[in-house]
Amino acid sequence: MADDIAGRGDPIKTLQLMWGRIEAPKRGPKSKLAVADLVRAAVRLADEEGIDAVSTRRVAEAVGISPMSFYTHIPDKAVLLDLMLDAVARPADGSEEAQAFRPEDWRANVAFVAREYRAFYLRHPWVLQVATHRPVLGPNTMRAYDYFLAAFDGLNLSEVEMDLSVTMVANYVHGAVRDVARARMVKELTGMSDDEWWHAIAPFLETVDFSPYPVASRIGPVVGELYGLGDPDRAFEFGLECLLDGLAVMVERKGGRR
């Protein structure tokens, strides 16, 4: 895992760049590049090669400027990282327009947003490697938060309950999607898929006496035959349904929609 941490850079400078509050220099030639160009190049590198591939030098080379010129736009890699996180922190193109949330459909709304959030991590798996605690309060991050909150609007929940519900679902998605990202990483590092690994060790497992583990020996063969090491999609949907069942209890108690 990379050692990158969100929020390490100058917070005011970061916010100024995110919200377009940096004034262009009054003297000298006007730059043909915008901060957004550098951020897009950095995101492209991270998506294609991983977060460890992102450096100020690589980003500068990708847009055709010198490494020193990079710093006239963005002060350091720490600020760049926050800009990258905000740049990708938005629903997929068209999803906001395609999904008009109605309170009576809250369960479908929350499920839709949770799946979109999972898809976001699969599009940008490097985000999972960035330690985050202090939020990146850029325009895209705020838009995504507002969009997530809207799935819980109109259910008679308090402001705090709405925020905590978003946090709960987001935490579930974050934890569940890591298995998919890890599986891809392990396959790349070992050159062997989970199914190939499972079939390689199966002959040895058949020689082991599992009777001291009665419950595991009953369940293991069934799930092993069905999906080997696991089925991340099935597991995600199962967990999401359980989460929605729990939320339904609170929504009904608060007098919201069934």
Image (spheres, rainbow, N blue to C red):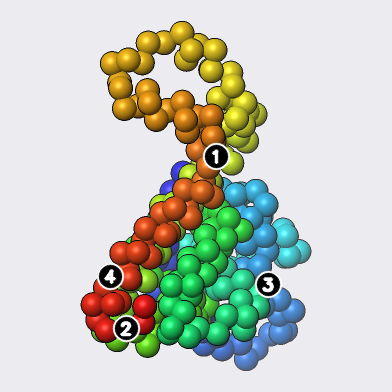
Badge nearest the viewer, 4 or 1: 4
Front residue of 145 and 14: 145
> Which residue extends farthest bottom?
26
Q: Which mark is residue 249?
A: 4
Horizontal side of 175 relative to 65 (left or right) equals left
Q: Is residue 162 above or below residue 167?
A: below
Q: Quadrant of residue 190?
A: top right
Where disc 2 sits, the SS reads loop
Q: Quadrant of residue 42?
A: bottom right
Q: Gap in Å between the C-alphas at discs 3 and 2?
A: 45 Å
Residue position for label 1? 183
Residue position for label 2? 256
Residue at screen point 32% across, 69% down: 247
Badge nearest the viewer, 3 or 2: 2
Residue 246 x, y percent position in the rendering: 31, 64
Residue 191 x, y percent position in the rendering: 65, 29
Q: Which mark is residue 37?
A: 3
Q: Gap in Å between the C-alphas at discs 4 and 1?
A: 34 Å
Q: What's the residue type where badge 2 is placed? A: Gly
Horizontal side of 165 relative to 138 (left or right) equals left
